[in-house]
Amino acid sequence: MATVNRFEDLEIWQLARKLYSKISLIAERLRLKREFRFAEQMKAAAGSIMDNIAEGFERSSRLEFINAQSISKGECGELKSQIYRCFDDKYISETEFTDLYKETDILTKKIAAFIMYLNSCETKGLKFKDRQK
């Protein structure tokens, strides 16, 4: 795997950003229906996915990075549940549901694969690079 120097270069962050943009549009619709809390919950979950990827990367520790990715993966699960609620409450169409769910599921799987990759790495990260055992 090539060395990544910026979190913006991570495919999972890029996918999370695209997903956040789509969820933001849904949140606008929810606000029009006076579903302010639900709108903010969805935006928060989607935003947390990309934010935790970035935060974990910037911590410069493999173990902290893995932990942050685990949180991102959990937020994907929360967002999937919210997408179901959106569909069940008829705020989105079946096609929108299917597309959003699929995108979130792909992101979940890619984060899981990335966690497995990070778990197999020997590198400790910059934070612990020069420390002795």
Image: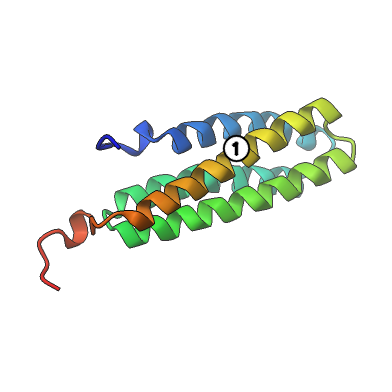
Query: Which percent across, then down, holds residue 88?
Result: 89, 42
Query: Which percent across, then down, holds residue 63?
Result: 34, 62
Query: From this viewpoint, which residue is outermost toward the bottom?
Result: 133
Query: Which percent across, then down, holds residue 49?
Result: 53, 46
Query: Does the image show residue 125?
Result: yes
Query: Does the image show residue 28?
Result: no
Q: Observer-nearest residue: 53 or 24?
A: 53
Total count of labels:
1
Seen at 19% across and 54% down, the residue is 126
Residue type highlighted by circle 1: Ile
| Mark 1: few/some/many CA within 10 Å (<14, 14-19, 20+) | some
Relative side of 29 to 63, left or right: right
Q: Observer-nearest residue: 55 or 100?
A: 100
Relative side of 35 to 14, left or right: right
Seen at 49% across and 42% down, the residue is 50
Seen at 73% across and 32% down, the residue is 26
Residue underneath mark 1: 106
Relative side of 27 to 127, left or right: right
Residue 22 to residue 129: above or below: above
